[in-house]
Image (cartoon, rainbow, N blue to C red):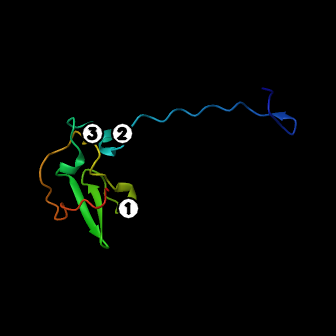
Amino acid sequence: MSDITLWGASLPPVEEPAPAPEHSVNPCIDAYGKGPEGTCCRTCVHLLRLEYHNKVYIKCELRKITHGAGSDHRAKWDACKRYQEGESTDDNRGYDTYDN
């Protein structure tokens, strides 16, 4: 392939961007490490279900809750190392409408 020129001047070579670092889907795994095999956030005491305008938003109390989409969590994600099985103290624990 010949050198690409722009108005008679050669352009500098294009460098390939560095590959993105490996990370999991669950940001808590990146922060705390992977939890017990076969567990998901659905049964963790840290999972919160917050109601707002007739909708339920799932959050994790181990993450900063911004009340925006950036802090939304998924109950089906693999659990992190801080996983604790049990009932949440959150009154909205029974709702599963948000992660369908």
Specify the label residue 24 is tagged with: 2
Q: Is the residue 63 above or below the residue 81 in the image?
A: below
- Which one is nearer the viewer's eye here, 57 or 21? 57
* Quarter placement of the N terminus: top right
Q: Is 42 placed left or right of 68 in the picture?
A: left
- Asked whether the residues under the numbered discs 2 and 1 touch, taking CB atoms below 8 Å apart as contact, a structural biologist would say no
Alpha-carbon span between mark 2 and mark 3: 11 Å
Specify the label residue 32 is tagged with: 3
The quarter holding residue 57 reads bottom left
Q: Given this view, does label 2 or label 1 mark the residue nearer the observer? A: 2
Q: Dot 3 surroundings within 10 Å: few (below 14), some, or many (20 or more)?
A: few
Amino acid type at circle 2 is: Ser
The quarter holding residue 34 reads top left
Q: Residue at x 31, y 54 (%)?
A: 64
Alpha-carbon span between mark 2 and mark 1: 21 Å
Amino acid type at circle 1 is: Gly
Alpha-carbon span between mark 3 and mark 1: 22 Å
- Asked whether the residues under the numbered discs 2 and 3 touch, taking CB atoms below 8 Å apart as contact, a structural biologist would say no
Sequence-earlier tag: 3 or 1: 3
- Asked whether the residues under the numbered discs 3 and 1 touch, taking CB atoms below 8 Å apart as contact, a structural biologist would say no
Sequence-earlier tag: 2 or 1: 2
Residue 4, image x, y percentages: 80, 33
Element type at marker 1? loop
Residue 58, image x, y percentages: 28, 58
Residue denoted by label 1: 68
Q: Given this view, does label 2 or label 3 mark the residue nearer the observer? A: 2
* Quarter placement of the C terminus: bottom left
Q: Residue at x 24, y 54 (%)?
A: 61
Q: Is the residue 26 above or below the residue 70 in the image?
A: above
- Which one is nearer the viewer's eye here, 31 or 34? 34
The quarter holding residue 39 reads top left
